[in-house]
Image (cartoon, grey):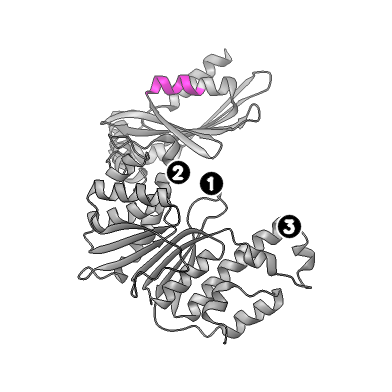
Amino acid sequence: MEKRELHSVLTDFLNERLIQVTASGQAEKNDFLKAKIRPVLAKGALHFQAEEFIGKQAFHKNLTAEEAVDYLEGLMGTSFRQLQLEAQDKSGTVLVSKKGKVTVKVKKKAAVANVAASASGQDSGSTGGSDAALKAAWAGGLSHNRKKRYILEEGIPVPFLVELGVQTKDGAIVHAKYDKFRQINRFLEFIEDVLPKLDKNQETRIIDFGCGKSYLTFAMYYYLKVLKGYPVRITGLDLKTDVIEHCSRLAKKFGYDSLEFLHGDIASYEGTDEVDMVVTLHACDTATDYALEKAVRWNAKVILSVPCCQHEVNKQMKSELFAPVFHYGIIKERMAALYTDALRAEVLEAMGYRVQILEFIDMEHTPKNLLIRAVKQGKRKENREAIEAILKEIHTEPTLYRLLMEEK
């Protein structure tokens, strides 16, 4: 009887009125954290996308209504003890006890139903028009508003994403690379924000320090040169020879004539005297500082930096005031990382940049998730005394401060 009741409520919810179903409350501790079901339009037909959160990854698959019901029944029989169901006209909760007892509660949203009926010109005794209106509204909202709008869209194959294993040949996102796909698009959003600083009538020179496998370097070139038509010349710099050779082959294969990859060190790079944008992603510890110094010396219009492994300040800092806090190693480490990036931002402000510290990707994926975005504005911030007071209090001398602000 209870299984039939579960089947009945799922069948009742899984239609065009559904907003979302969430399965949570693990039956036993493992990497399968939760699952969600939401309606999607696939080739013009109603389907239900299952999103499984396993460890730090999300996996997706599209199901028919019948398959989605079977899928959720299976989850409630093995993995989870709670379902939260949300539809346009009602909400519901399903709880499964350790002994298998199923409790179902459903609550109607009378106000929504009345508004829909009123909008369609129908009274409570005639629902055909309101159903049609709801279906039309749902289809329009689903196709235009509910789908996440990415700069590089799902379903549209991009050569470098296919080659690097993020997309399949038909443009679908490889499940294991979905976080990378989101990261790439998030990075391009930062690029999009600074487009007004780039001149479309002359070549923009960009240096990417520590480019690594160059997912974001290729994305930056593709977005600026191919999609937006900016005349750019991008150089990716890294210490790993095999990586540089591989990326160079890919750039040649794709016909990216204004994209080059060079073997070299951030601190000693002297390949140019003028750069418009400097990108440094996950350059370890003080390598970030040397990249930022280069950018300032070049008078770069834009700096995008995701710091990593901020060890320097952690090793130096001590304070009688904060001694009880610094006593805890993990707290000291995290505070050191935050101090490092905040001080970097202040030094850049002193050099005439407007600086923001932004979240790059979700904390659940990596703690190294902050991006420093600096845009040249000319006016220098008078903050030397404030910076030096902080450095004196925690007994530190960060590399970027030493390179750009320390009096010789």
* C-alpha separation, residue under disc 1 versus residue under disc 3: 22 Å
- The mark nearer the N terminus, 1 or 2, is 2
**Crowd class of label 1 (few under 14; some 14 to 19; many from 20; radius 10 Å):** few
**Crowd class of label 2 (few under 14; some 14 to 19; many from 20; radius 10 Å):** some
Q: Residue at x 62, y 68 (%)?
A: 339
Where residue 289 appears, x then y in whole percent? 52, 69
- The mark nearer the N terminus, 1 or 3, is 3
* C-alpha separation, residue under disc 2 versus residue under disc 3: 30 Å
Give the image quarter of residue 170.
top left
The majority secondary structure of the magenta stretch comes to: helix
User: Which residue type carries mark 3?
Assistant: Gly
Compare residues 208 and 138 and report the one nearer the observer.
208
Q: Is residue 39 above or below residue 245?
A: above
Residues at circles 1 and 3 in contact by the CB criterion of under 8 Å: no
Per the rendered image, the range of residues in magenta is 64-72
Q: How many marks?
A: 3
Label 2 sits on residue: 179
Label 3 sits on residue: 329
Where residue 215 appears, x then y in whole percent? 38, 49
Label 1 sits on residue: 365
Residues at circles 1 and 2 in contact by the CB criterion of under 8 Å: yes
Q: Is residue 28 above or below residue 405?
A: above
Compare residues 89 and 358 and report the one nearer the observer.
358
